[in-house]
Image: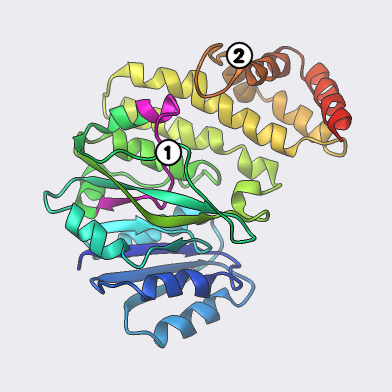
Amino acid sequence: MFLSVVIPVFNMEKYIDRCLESIIRQTDNDFEVILVDDGSIDKSYETAVSYLENSYINHKVIKKNNQGQSIARNIGMQSAKGEYILFLDSDDIVSKNLVSECKQAVLEKPDILMFDYKRVDEDGTTRENKISLSSDDNVAGCEIIKKYKENQFNMWTSSAIYRREFLRRKKIIFCPEAHAAEDLGFQFKALLSTDRVKVINYVLSYYCQRKESLTNNINIEKNMTVIDAFEDVLKFIEYKEMDVSLEKPIIGEFIPEHIMYQILGYLNKDNAEEVLDILDDKSVHRYLMKAKMRTPRYGKSMVKWMKIAAWSPEKFIRKYLDVVKGEN
């Protein structure tokens, strides 16, 4: 079997049929679907089972208690039989040519195949990526990360497939403790482990933007596990005895950026005390203090907020809420 499509599902009854329909209409049927229901309390499981049982495709549906999509993806990966694996979110969709285009592109068996994607708003508006991918063979994964850090490359969970044997051999899994940025952490570990990455510029998947998605989750404690996701990458680098210089952009750019992204997206006058507790956390404070001053990852405005938040959390909250109030 060529491809295993691993789909974690949690309360997605409104979207799962659309996702599965995009998979079922593939022009090449050399794939399986492994759907892992992560303790849904709506009709996601029943909807998915009904849809899959009435289709011709190979599939397996696994039901488990709610533990988060990292663990759900790991369970799906363990059950996969395909030569390659695609991790697809249950509210996203793929091109009907995904399997056929990927199969044709991996004749030389790269460890990772990366392709382009588009964003789709709730109203159906499709948005192109600002940075299109350039086709290339046998790119070192660390070069991909460097381009991503410099904002010269776009990547997303469902814009790549991974050779299953490569993931097994390198012991690459999703960080079980992470509920945010776990996908980026997984991609970093995979990319750092190979110099056999192929890139094609075909759009083969669609990232559907929803206000209530996990990316916009208002659970700040879960969202702050971005730190766990990236610290998992740091441990991976140490365990694999990789070049320690790889740690610098993670510590000084990616972690501070993601901490502030979560805080700025969450802070309002009603949860100021909760955010203050987050900023008083030693780990959060340490990473904000280490934030790099000049980087393509974020601009001067973000650096300003990082430094104020690190040195004086109360002042940061007061000033930021004044800015938000003024904009409204």
User: Residue shown at 36%/30% (left/top)?
Assistant: 145
Residue 50's spot in the image, x, y percent? 48, 85
Q: Report, in whole angstroms, how far the alpha carbon at label 1 lies from the one at label 2.
A: 27 Å
The residue labelled by disc 2 is 289
Q: Which residue is rendered at x = 77% and y = 14% of the image?
A: 312
Quarter occupied by residue 293: top right
Q: Which mark is residue 154?
A: 1
Q: 10 Å neighbourhood of mark 1: few (<14), some, or many (≥20)?
A: many
Q: Secondary structure at mark 2?
A: helix
Q: Quadrant of residue 300?
A: top right
**Viewport quadrant of the N terminus:** bottom left
Question: Which stretch is magenta?
Answer: 146-163
Is there any visible trace of residue 276 in the rendered image? Answer: yes
Residue 80 in view here: no
Could you tell me residue 273's position as x and y percent?
Answer: 83, 32
Circles 1 and 2: CB atoms closer than 8 Å: no
Query: In this picture, is 143 found above or below 111?
Result: above
Closer to the camera: disc 1 or disc 2? Answer: 1
- Magenta stretch containing residue 156, yes or no? yes
Query: Disc 2 residue type?
Result: Met
For residue 245: magenta? Answer: no
